[in-house]
Every structure is written in structure tokens, then in C-alpha cells.
Image: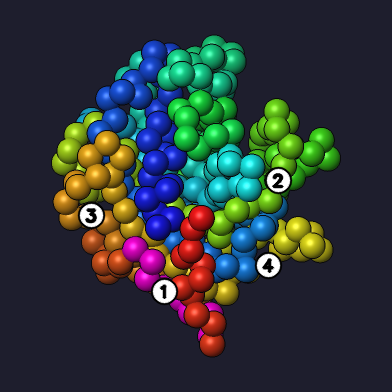
Amino acid sequence: MLGVYILAIAMFLIVIPTASSAQLFEYNLQIGAFGDSASIGNIGVQVEIKTHVSDVYLPDLGDAFWVGNILINGAFIQFGYQLSPSYSPTCLGGEVTGGQVKCQGPPEYVENRDARWFWEYWPNVNTIDFYYGIGEAHSVGSEGSWHLYTIEPNVANGWNFVLDGQTVASFNNFQYTASKDPAFMVAEELNISPVSTGKLGPVEFRNLQYLRQTDREWRQDTSLIALSGCGVISPNCGTIPYSISVEGPNDILAGTGLQTRQEGELLWPRLNTPHSSSMRRD
């Protein structure tokens, strides 16, 4: 299942203090959707996400809302926004190696309710090593504002992270490559407790698109498949308190108090096309 694979990827996401706290994470919860099989092999993804500003308290280390890809070279790339107040100085960019942060630039404290864009690139999804960047204070606007998050190749054969049509960061340590799996968008919560706070979202996502490698054109997904999972170190964490509401084609709400969905459930169908093939994994 895609959810199980992604959950293993995201264990160390979001809060990046100057001293590693990775060993404290018990599990994370994810709710959202991924696209149809036609999006496999894309070289870019984008989605509109409606900013939802809320307080984040311990034991919740932070919430993130993003679009991303698992790549054929074994890497994982994502771009979106996060809410993650820091309880120690937080590096806004750098590399995490062996759980230790190599910070680029001076760290700073992130206040609560400060929604910022972020990106991450994991060269190998089976390790805790990754590169990342975090935006300036309140960089994704106020409550209820819509913003377009885009990951696309750049002229240096790396990646650009584009917010509302403006490149906010680039990553050229590795060349761009196509996706291995369908593109996806996810709302996510991390905890250091075996009991979830249950206060994620709701956050709205719409217009999931992928960049075709063949003609370099953006194409809208023709179906959405539910992602609903929990567990990294503690896989049996009980009932997932998050759910999904389908607002229309390529438009979903993800968070607390919505309709419960099963992992792999077809949310919005591509007519006359079975979706089971898009759930296959090597």
C-alpha cells in the first residue's frame, strides 16, 4: 500500500531543531489522496492548498500539508506548508545526516500559528538523511488564502519549488527524475505520543496536476485515491481520527470530523477505468 510506504518516509518530517529529536517520534498520521496511474512518470506536480492557521501544542510536533512524488531513483520530494512552533532554535535550511542537522544560515524560533512553506528532498527513502528548506515568517498567507505549490525541473536539471508562480527555492544537488508512483497530496500530523490530538485541519486541496514528461504539459488528475494510514514505530495506533470529504472533482477536504475513508478507496472516479492497477507496488 502506498500509505505504508509514505509513512515510513515521513517519520522525521517537519520540526528540525538544532539538536535532533528524531528518536522521540512515536508515529505519524496521514490523511489525503493520491492521483491516478496516468500520473506515474511525471516530472512535476502542483496543487492549490488553502491555508489553515491553527495552534500546535505538545505532544504534536507539527502539521504539514503538501504535494509530492516518490521518484524512480529512490528519492522522495515534497513541497507545501507547515505549522511547527519550535521549542528550540530551528534551522531554516540545510541537510540532515544521521539525524544530525547541518544548518545553513542562522537558526530562529518559529512562533505558533506561523504558517510557512517548506520543501524536502530525500535521496534515499530508507534512511533519515534529507535536504530541506523552510520559508520566512507567515510566508503562505493568512487563514483562508489559497496558494499554488509547484515542484518542477529547472534549467540546471535540478528542482524548483514555486509558490504562486514565483520560485522560492531551488535544489540542484541531484538531477530531476520522473516519478515511480502516482503523484499525491497529503495532510499529515506527527506526534511523540501514542495518542493523537485529533485536531488536524480540515484543510482543502484542489486542482492536483502533474507535468507530463512527454510533452512538458500540465495535466489534471482524472481520479483520486484515498490515503489513510498511521504507524512508523507503533503501527497499531488505533482509530485514525482524520477523514476526507470530497468537495468535487480534484477538490477534497482532509482533517478532523469528515467522512471516514479506507486506504485505497476511490474518491473521485475515472470513468470506465479500474483503479486497482494504480495500487500496485514493486
In three-dimensional space, the C-alpha distance between marks 1 and 4, rounded to whole angstroms, equals 19 Å
Badge nearest the viewer, 1 or 2 = 2
Query: Is most of the magenta stretch helix, strand or loop?
Result: loop
Indicate whether residue 264 is drawn in magenta. yes
Which quarter shows the N terminus?
A: bottom left
In three-dimensional space, the C-alpha distance between marks 1 and 2, rounded to whole angstroms, equals 28 Å
Residue identified by numbered label 3: 240
Is label 1 in contact with label 2 (beta carbons under 8 Å)?
no
Indicate whether residue 272 is drawn in magenta. no
Mark 2, other Cα within 10 Å: few <14 / some 14–19 / many ≥20: many
Which residue lies at the image location 50% right of the left edge and 80% below the top edge? Answer: 274
Q: Residue furthest front?
A: 282
Q: Position of residue 37 (x, y in %)?
A: 57, 67
In three-dimensional space, the C-alpha distance between marks 4 and 2, rounded to whole angstroms, equals 18 Å
Residue identified by numbered label 4: 219
Numbered circle sitting on residue 177: 2
In three-dimensional space, the C-alpha distance between marks 1 and 3, rounded to whole angstroms, equals 18 Å
Residue identified by numbered label 1: 266
Disc 4 element: strand
Residue type beneath disc 1:
Leu
Q: Is 101 or 181 nearer to us in this picture?
A: 181
Q: Which residues are magenta?
A: 263-271
Q: In the rendered image of this protein, does residue 14 appear above or below residue 235?
A: above
